[in-house]
Amino acid sequence: MSQQSFMNRRALLKTFGLGAVGLAVGSQLGTGMRASAQDAAPAARASAFYTQMIGDLELTVIQEAKIGLDASLFGLNAEAGAAAALLTENNLPSPAIDSTVNISLIRSGDRLALVDAGLGDFPFPGSSANRLIPTLALLGIAPTDITDLIITHFHPDHLGGISSMDGVVAFPNAVHHIHSVELNFLKNTSGTPLDDFINAANGRLQPIEAASQLQTFEADAELLPGVFAVHTPGHTPGHIALRLSSGDAQAMATLDVANHVVLALSRPDWYFGFDADPAAAVETRKSVFGMLADEKIQVVGYHFPFPGVGMIARDGEGFRYFGA
Ligand SMILES: [Zn+2]
């Protein structure tokens, strides 16, 4: 993996304006865009998919992207190097983390919904992205077939793919659902280190709003039959997970309640660099994964190794994941 193919924490925070230092963010982003455009060029190909039933709900997970992160993004409240050491202890590469973006496609009756849309053409250094639409084509699904798009939060690896950089709506027949708390935050927050993410998100939402395809929902809403929004704050103010329920079958798509299958589950108390309110994120992580472990509910992890579908067990103060 080349030096450019993943970002260390300092570069990442600089690039997206999350660092404490006010840098020339535009030029940093420009550098990232060039690097990523080169990386992404051969990536407009189909990727992997995985399908299973949850009662009458059909869940298909599509690998939209692979992204590079650095261990130093994890354990911000731990000793320096602790996350890298935990990766090494688990025989995983360190400190460069090869992460994944798993998009859920849910068929519920005559509705066909995507849960987020991945990076799309959003420039993210080290990414190999934009594989959602070619993979849907493998499944015989055109973008116009998607009836609903559920936006779980505003980060670019989740809503980058809802529209293109030049403002074309990716799923022209889809109602786009967003939590009122998240939209309110996006519309009314500026002058914070998150400005670049917020501006990028508002830019991607603009053509959806212009086409009157954006609808807000409140916590606990049933977004389509058997699919419920669960407010899971911390990563972002309006972050949602999704509870999937059909007959006796249940699963939960946890999205960014946990951002790494080992680091976030073994040490749910560790702060993560992209959590807006890390203390709240810790509480949410412990309670969601505790519930999944105790109630033996299947998990669908957005950033877990593809397809990220499995079971959770308690392990000391943390948790372990078993692919199923
Ligand atoms: Zn994410």
Image: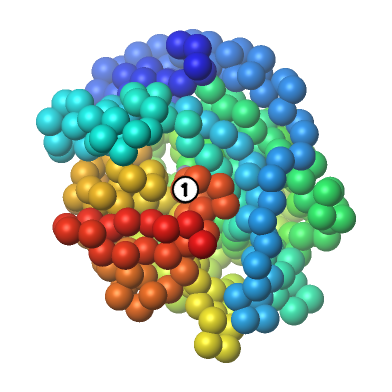
Q: Is 28 situated above or below 282?
A: above
Q: Residues within 10 Å of mark 1 (few under 14, many from 20)?
A: many
238 left or right of 163 in image: left
Give percent across and percent down for residue 28. 46, 13
Q: Nearer the viewer, residue 278 or 206?
A: 278
Q: Is 30 situated above or below 267?
A: above
Hey, which residue is sitting farthest left in the picture? 79
296 left or right of 225 in image: left
- Which residue is at 77% across, 60% downward? 146
- Which residue is at 38% across, 56% downward? 321
65 left or right of 304 in image: right
- Which residue is at 37% across, 33% downward? 92
Q: Nearer the viewer, residue 188 or 264?
A: 264
Residue that mark 1 sits on = 304
Give percent across and percent down for residue 11. 38, 18
What kind of residue is marked 1? Phe
Whether residue 146 is visible to the viewer of this picture, yes or no, is yes
Tell me the quarter of the picture where residue 69 sits. top left
Give percent across and percent down for residue 124. 54, 26
